């Protein structure tokens, strides 16, 4: 065989071998590594959504009644504001139109005189949205009352609410009890329902209940994320012909295990324990 021909065959074989080998591995430094931004985005996607705290308030229970109050239009009505929510000018009502009232905001700055600031502040108003109207008898007269829930619109993410208990008298609703609740885990409204002729109120938080027209404050050690309550308190109120009075014990349940035995009147126990610890110091 001709020498030149042999050399040609060898060269061709070397070329084929070179082409069949895996190519060089790309420099890892040239490829972007998952950085903090990617990791943060993945964490956001994986993070659980906050629970819907309005589920029981907006369900279909107690939505209908044969009582005349069931035909009244609570979406277009003027409501009395409970203590703590009155307007800056001293007026104490809010008028809904189609279930809503937009908040009125006014701004002040250092260039304004004191009188001008006072006028601007007096014009401010909270807003409100109708959340639900429930019907059941809580006065023992055999006729359903209307329990109306409004969400206070503050312009932020807070969810304070106002509850109104109306009876039907002389062809119109008559207010028996207005009260306000807190914001989500901080005494926010969980549920309203009848039981044994009483009005049962459930508020998020440890030993949170209604006193007069407002929810009570936090007890010692009640620390939790605002979005995600760990506890709720059940309390019951009976109509005595003039007002609703707290009945029995206040029961604090764990949200994660509501069937577990509740803690009774937790506030007294927690505050007594805190006082005992203070005396030891």
Image (spheres, rainbow, N blue to C red):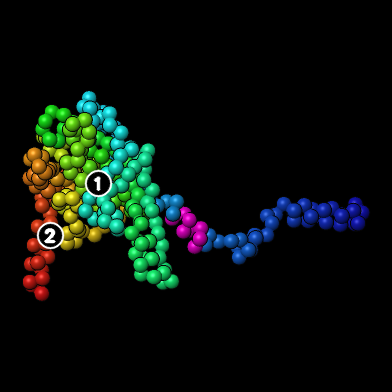
Q: Which of 73/42 is in front?
A: 73
Q: Which of 8/86 is in front?
A: 86
Q: Position of residue 36 (x, y in %)?
A: 49, 62
- Looking at the image, residue 114 sits to the left or right of residue 18; the answer is left
- Taking the image as drawn, is residue 216 in sight? yes
In the image, residue 135 above or below residue 23:
above
Residue at 27% over, 28% down: 71
- Location of the C terminus (image quadrant): bottom left
Residue at 61% over, 65% down: 29
How crowded pointer 1 is (Cα within 10 Å; few <14, some 14-19, many 20+) is rated as some
Q: Earlier in the sequence, mark 1 or mark 2?
A: 1
- Taking the image as drawn, is residue 185 in sight? no
Which residues are the magenta region?
36-43
- Looking at the image, residue 148 sits to the left or right of residue 31; the answer is left
Quarter holding residue 142 = top left
Magenta stretch secondary structure, dominant: helix
Residue at 33% over, 38% down: 76
Q: Which of 197/164 is in front?
A: 164
Q: Position of residue 125 (x, y in %)?
A: 34, 53
Residue at 30% over, 58% down: 88
Q: Position of residue 182 (x, y in %)?
A: 25, 52
Mark 2, residue position: 270
Number of the label disc, if any, that sits on residue 169 = none
């Amino acid at each position: 065989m001709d020498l030149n021909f042999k050399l040609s065959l060898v060269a061709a074989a070397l070329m084929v071998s070179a082409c069949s080998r895996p190519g060089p591995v790309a420099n890892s430094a040239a490829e972007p590594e998952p950085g903090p931004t990617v990791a943060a985005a993945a964490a956001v996607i994986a993070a659980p959504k906050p629970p819907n705290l309005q589920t029981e308030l907006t369900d279909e229970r107690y939505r209908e009644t044969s009582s005349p109050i069931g035909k009244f239009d609570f979406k277009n009505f003027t409501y009395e504001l409970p203590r703590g929510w009155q307007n800056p000018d001293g007026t104490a009502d809010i008028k809904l139109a189609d279930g809503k009232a937009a908040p009125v905001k006014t701004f002040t700055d250092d260039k304004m005189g004191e009188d001008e600031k006072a006028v601007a502040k007096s014009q401010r108003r909270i807003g409100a949205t109708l959340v639900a109207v429930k019907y059941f008898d809580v006065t023992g007269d055999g006729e359903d009352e209307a329990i109306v829930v409004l969400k206070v619109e503050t312009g932020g993410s807070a969810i304070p609410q106002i509850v109104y208990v109306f009876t039907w008298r002389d062809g119109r609703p008559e207010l028996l009890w207005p009260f306000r609740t807190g914001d989500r885990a901080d005494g926010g409204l969980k549920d309203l329902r009848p039981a044994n002729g009483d009005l049962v109120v459930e508020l998020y938080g440890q030993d949170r209940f209604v006193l007069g027209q407002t929810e009570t404050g936090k007890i010692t050690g009640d620390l939790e994320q605002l979005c995600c309550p760990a506890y709720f308190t059940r309390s019951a109120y009976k109509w005595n012909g003039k007002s609703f009075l707290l009945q029995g014990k206040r029961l604090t349940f764990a949200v994660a295990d509501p069937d577990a035995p509740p803690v009774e009147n937790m506030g007294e126990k927690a505050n007594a324990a805190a006082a005992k610890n203070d005396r030891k110091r």
